[in-house]
């Protein structure tokens, strides 16, 4: 667990899983301050998202393709649960680029090796390394 991160005026402490912090797109490590940034905004955003794989709330990892709205929690990203009847569009597994902390939903997994996306993933990952 990482934290505490202070949330709001009530000064509530928020702790996050390291694996979740590594995969959320808006969190990043600031090398100048050695702090993890944007954790609270990621925390609030994930409370409003529903997993495209299993339908559960509390999702934080989105498909790397910018125009894709699909999201999942890190547990579904790693476990690749069977598609549910409510989400028949999930016709396969997510594709992960573990070294770059980027995920592609089943509909876009074929784009996971696209040259331009790979170049962008590598650049993004270089800027957001965190304690690992």
Image (cartoon, helix red, strand yellow):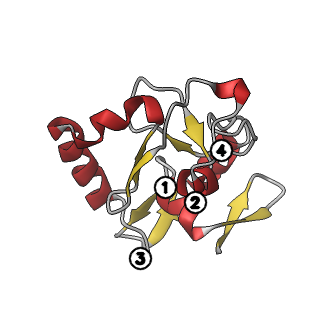
Answer whether labels 1 and 3 touch (C-beta < 8 Å).
no
Answer whether labels 2 and 1 touch (C-beta < 8 Å).
yes
Mark 3 and mark 4: Cα distance apart in space = 22 Å
Residue linked to disc 3:
132
- Of tags 3 and 4, the one toward the viewer is 4
Residue linked to disc 1:
23
Determine whether, in the image, residue 106 is placed left or right of residue 83. left
Residue linked to disc 4:
59
What is the secondary structure assignment of the residue under circle 4? loop
What is the secondary structure assignment of the residue under circle 1? helix
Q: Which of 63 and 120 is in front in this view?
A: 63
Q: Which of 83 and 44 is in front in this view?
A: 83
Residue linked to disc 2:
20
| Mark earlier in primary sequence (3, 4) | 4
Residue 1, picture quadrant: bottom right
Mark 3 and mark 2: Cα distance apart in space = 13 Å
């Amino acid at each position: 667990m990482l934290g505490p991160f202070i949330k709001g005026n009530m000064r509530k402490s928020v702790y996050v899983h390291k694996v979740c912090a590594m995969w959320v797109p808006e969190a990043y490590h600031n090398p100048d301050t050695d702090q993890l940034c944007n954790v609270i905004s990621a925390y609030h955003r994930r409370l409003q998202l529903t997993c495209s794989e299993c339908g559960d709330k509390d999702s934080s990892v989105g498909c790397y393709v910018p125009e894709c709205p699909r999201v999942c929690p890190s547990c579904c990203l790693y476990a690749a649960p069977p598609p549910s009847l409510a989400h028949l569009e999930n016709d396969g597994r997510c594709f992960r680029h573990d070294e770059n902390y980027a995920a592609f939903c089943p509909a876009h997994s074929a784009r996971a090796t696209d040259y331009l996306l790979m170049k962008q993933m590598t650049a993004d990952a270089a800027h957001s390394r965190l304690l690992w």
